[in-house]
Structure formats: structure tokens, C-alpha cells
Image: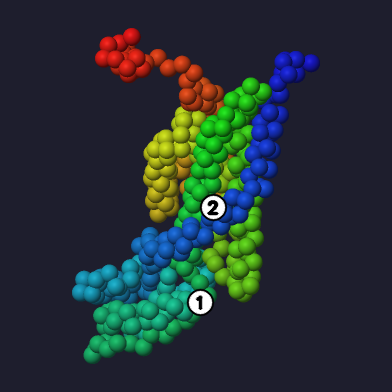
């Protein structure tokens, strides 16, 4: 018989399971849970507004280049004409890059290059300045046909110079379109993950303060280890959050199906939709446990709801800054800022979810999840230690030692005289 059985107390993990089961059933079958499920209606409004702003961010974050594949002298003439036109018109002229210098009689398959979805190419110009051919998605054809005609006219050696007819060839997509779509998926995934974690992690605060107020914490502490109370509450709220997300996800999928929409209409993430959703669930769990352990530790130090709000504000604002840091890393892929966002525990789930949308590699997620799991264990260990030390000291003290001056004044009022007792 182990020591916990001899003392009549449950083991750490069994006690944590008892607390988690109690909190889960109490919240799930409460009336307030219905209002909890309605809570995401407000973040959805924020998401729609942020998507409008995000569309403008995408335009500046992804450079849509026009590639030139012509003979050597024609390439130089087209680039020089583009730069000259841009100096007069400005940023409305798309960037033009040298794609390939063709030998006389050499052919070039622009359609295959664009449909390969590599790089940031949005269109390719082939042929000659006198007879240019523009290959691009249908939307870019209408947008850039006139611009390419002006550039070709400036590069043409024909006399008199005239705007040539631009032959157009449409493709289904391009590297720039694919990158832009994946960036939108990355930003939307980060924003959704942030809203869910912030909305759901704050539940542990109100639950803890309520139980501290009605002395339930003291009753639990007399029966089970305080570390078990910490872990039980944290994982109970995680289970409630997963249940809520399942309800919201089912409702969202149903609305998409009724509206005749499907995921095929959106840009396919780098790792594919099934693995992207799986990684999203795992990164949500890691991010929730990291932030939830911080909030639960804060709750253990605060005796009242007002104190909780005051102490939780810096943590909330810090998490907002962390989210902006991870969002900035999306536009700096392969640079030190992205690696810093991946290594820093609180921003790692956001940075790695964005990477899942942008890149096809899977092995970085295995390493990142392992690192985040280590950080979760450290956060829970430290948080449980602080929780154990602070939670029993946060209530009113049985006897409070007054300062001597204040004690004399109180004594005077109690005796109804102007002299101390």
C-alpha cells in the first residue's frame, strides 16, 4: 500500500482527474454554458473586420512579380522601359524581373512555370517587344494587359513607336496567387487561434476566484494535493474548450455546406487541410495550457475579482503583443524574427500554425510540438508551485496584526474616550 493510500489522500494524478471531472460536469450542465457557446459571435465580427484589413496587408506582404523570358537584348529593353515608366507613374507599375534569357529559336513554356506555383511570379511576358505575349491568371490579364503594352512600346525598336497588340494566355493560378492565398490562411489561422485561446483561457480565473470566495478551495486542499487542484482545473477547462470548439466547428461546417461552399475554394495550406486542422488542434492545446497556467497562477494570488482583473491585464496585454510578434514573423519567413517567434514559448503555437499554412515540411512541427510540450511541463510545474504557496494565503487572515498607531486609534473609539484604553 502506497503512502497516499495510507494517509487516506488520493494520488496526484487521480486527484487531478477527480477535480477535472467535477469542474467539467459542473460547467457543462450549467445554464451559463449556453451563453458561453454564444460568446464567439463577437470574435466572429472582429474576424470579419480584421479580414478586411488583412487583405490590404497581403498586398504589401507578397510581391507579385512579372517575369520576362525573351532574348537577351529584348529582356534588357523591357526592364529599362519598365523602370522608366515606373519613374513617371509610380508603384502602380508591377515589379518586373528577368526570368530567362532565351537563345535564338529557343522556346519557353510560361504556362508550366506559372502552374508550378513556385516563387512570387504573377505573370510572364514572352515573345518580343513588338509582339509580346502575356501569360497570367484571368484577373491579372485584365489588370496588366495595358501596362505591358506601354512597357513593350517603350522597349520596341520599331519606327514609328506604337502600342503593340498583347497576346494573352490565361492560367488557373500562379505562384503569387498561391502564396497570397496561403498567407491569408496563415493570418486567419493565427487570428482564430488567438481569439480562441484568449476567450477560453480567461475562464479559469473566474472559476478559481468563485471557489476561493466560497471556501471550496480550502475543502479541496484538505483532501487532495494542491498541485492536483491546479492541474485538474487547468485540464478541465481545456476539455470544456475542446467541447465548445467542436460545437462551433460543426456549426460553421454546416453553414458552409448549406451555403454551397467548400474548402476547395480556399488556398490549400502547405501541409494540406487535414493535417492543418490537426496541427491547429495541437497548437491550441499547447497555447491554452501555457496561457491557462499563467492565468491560474494569477488567480491564486488575487483575493477578489477586482484584483484578478487588475493582475490579469498585464498578462493579457503581453499576449496581444506576442500575437503581433507572431503575425510579423509571417512576413519574415526564413529570417531570425521567425525563428525567435518559434522558440519563444508563448508565440510558438501561432508561428508554427502559420508555418503549416505556408510550408509543406512536416518535421519542424514534430520538433516544435516537442519543445512546446517541455515548456508546458515547466509552466505547469512552476505555476502549481506558486499556486500551492499562494492560494491558501490569499483569503482573509484569522488574526491580523495592526500597526501600533492604528491600534491606539481603534482602542480610543471602542472606549468612547479621547484616551487609549
Horizontal side of residue 302 vs 244, given as left or right: left
Q: How crowded is the residue under tag 1: few (<14 C-alpha within 10 Å), some, or many (20+)?
A: some
Residue 54 x/y as whole percent: 41, 62
In the rendered image, the residue lying farthest to the front is 416
Residue 207 x/y as whole percent: 55, 39
- Comes first in the chain, label 2 or label 1: 1
SS assignment at label 1: strand
In the rendered image, the residue lying farthest to the top is 421
In the rendered image, the residue lying farthest to the left is 88
Residue visible at 52% across and 40% down in the picture? 206
Residue visible at 43% across and 70% down in the picture? 122
Horizontal side of residue 219 vs 410, given as left or right: right
Q: How crowded is the residue under tag 2: few (<14 C-alpha within 10 Å), some, or many (20+)?
A: many
Alpha-carbon span between mark 2 and mark 1: 26 Å
In the picture, the quarter occupied by the C terminus is: top left
Residue 178 appearing in the image: yes
Above or below, 88 against 18 in this view is below
Residue annotated with mark 2: 356
Closer to viewer: mark 2 or mark 1: 2
Residue 84 appearing in the image: no
Residue annotated with mark 1: 171
Horizontal side of residue 12 vs 81, given as left or right: right
Residue visible at 71% across and 29% down in the picture? 14
The one of 366 and 145 positioned closer to us in this rendering:
366
Residue visible at 37% across and 82% down in the picture? 145
> How was this image coloured?
rainbow
Answer yes or no: do the residues labelled 2 and 1 have beta carbons within 8 Å? no
Q: Quadrant of residue 376?
A: top right
Above or below, 398 against 353 in this view is above
Residue 55 x/y as whole percent: 41, 65
SS assignment at label 2: helix
Amino acid at each position: 500500500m502506497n503512502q497516499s493510500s495510507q494517509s487516506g489522500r488520493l494520488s496526484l494524478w487521480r486527484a487531478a482527474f477527480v477535480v477535472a471531472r467535477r469542474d467539467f460536469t459542473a460547467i457543462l450542465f450549467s445554464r451559463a454554458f449556453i451563453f458561453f457557446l454564444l460568446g464567439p459571435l463577437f470574435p466572429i465580427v472582429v474576424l470579419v473586420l480584421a479580414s478586411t484589413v488583412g487583405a490590404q496587408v497581403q498586398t504589401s506582404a507578397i510581391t507579385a512579380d512579372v517575369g520576362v523570358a525573351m532574348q537577351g537584348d529584348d529582356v534588357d529593353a523591357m526592364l529599362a522601359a519598365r523602370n522608366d515608366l515606373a519613374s513617371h507613374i509610380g508603384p502602380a507599375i508591377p515589379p518586373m524581373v528577368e526570368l530567362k534569357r532565351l537563345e535564338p529559336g529557343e522556346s519557353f513554356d510560361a504556362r508550366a512555370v506559372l502552374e508550378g506555383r513556385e516563387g512570387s511570379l504573377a505573370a510572364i511576358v514572352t515573345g518580343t517587344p513588338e509582339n509580346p505575349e502575356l501569360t497570367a491568371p484571368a484577373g491579372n490579364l485584365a489588370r496588366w494587359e495595358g501596362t505591358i503594352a506601354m512597357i513593350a512600346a517603350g522597349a520596341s525598336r520599331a519606327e514609328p513607336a506604337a502600342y503593340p497588340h498583347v497576346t494573352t494566355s490565361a492560367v488557373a493560378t500562379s505562384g503569387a496567387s498561391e502564396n497570397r492565398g496561403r498567407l491569408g490562411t496563415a493570418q486567419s489561422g493565427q487570428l482564430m487561434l488567438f481569439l480562441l485561446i484568449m476567450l477560453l483561457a480567461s475562464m479559469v480565473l473566474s472559476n478559481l476566484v468563485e471557489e476561493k470566495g466560497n471556501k471550496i478551495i480550502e475543502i479541496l486542499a484538505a483532501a487532495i494535493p494542491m498541485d492536483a487542484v491546479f492541474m485538474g482545473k487547468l485540464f478541465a477547462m481545456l476539455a470544456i474548450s475542446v467541447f465548445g470548439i467542436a460545437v462551433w466547428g460543426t456549426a460553421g461546417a454546416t453553414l458552409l455546406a448549406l451555403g454551397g461552399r467548400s474548402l476547395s475554394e480556399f488556398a490549400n495550406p502547405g501541409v494540406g487541410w487535414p493535417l492543418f486542422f490537426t496541427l491547429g488542434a495541437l497548437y491550441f492545446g499547447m497555447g491554452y495550457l501555457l496561457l491557462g497556467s499563467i492565468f491560474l497562477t494569477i488567480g491564486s494570488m488575487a483575493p477578489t475579482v477586482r484584483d484578478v482583473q487588475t493582475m490579469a491585464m498585464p498578462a493579457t496585454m503581453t499576449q496581444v503583443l506576442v500575437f503581433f510578434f507572431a503575425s510579423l514573423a509571417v512576413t519574415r519567413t526564413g529570417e531570425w524574427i521567425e525563428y525567435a517567434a518559434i522558440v519563444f514559448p508563448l508565440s510558438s503555437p501561432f508561428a508554427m500554425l502559420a508555418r503549416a499554412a505556408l510550408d509543406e515540411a512536416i518535421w519542424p512541427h514534430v520538433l516544435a510540438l516537442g519543445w512546446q510540450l517541455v515548456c508546458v511541463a515547466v509552466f505547469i510545474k512552476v505555476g502549481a508551485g506558486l499556486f500551492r504557496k499562494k492560494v491558501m494565503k490569499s483569503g482573509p487572515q484569522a488574526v491580523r496584526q495592526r500597526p501600533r498607531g492604528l491600534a491606539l486609534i481603534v482602542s480610543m473609539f471602542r472606549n468612547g474616550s479621547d484616551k487609549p484604553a
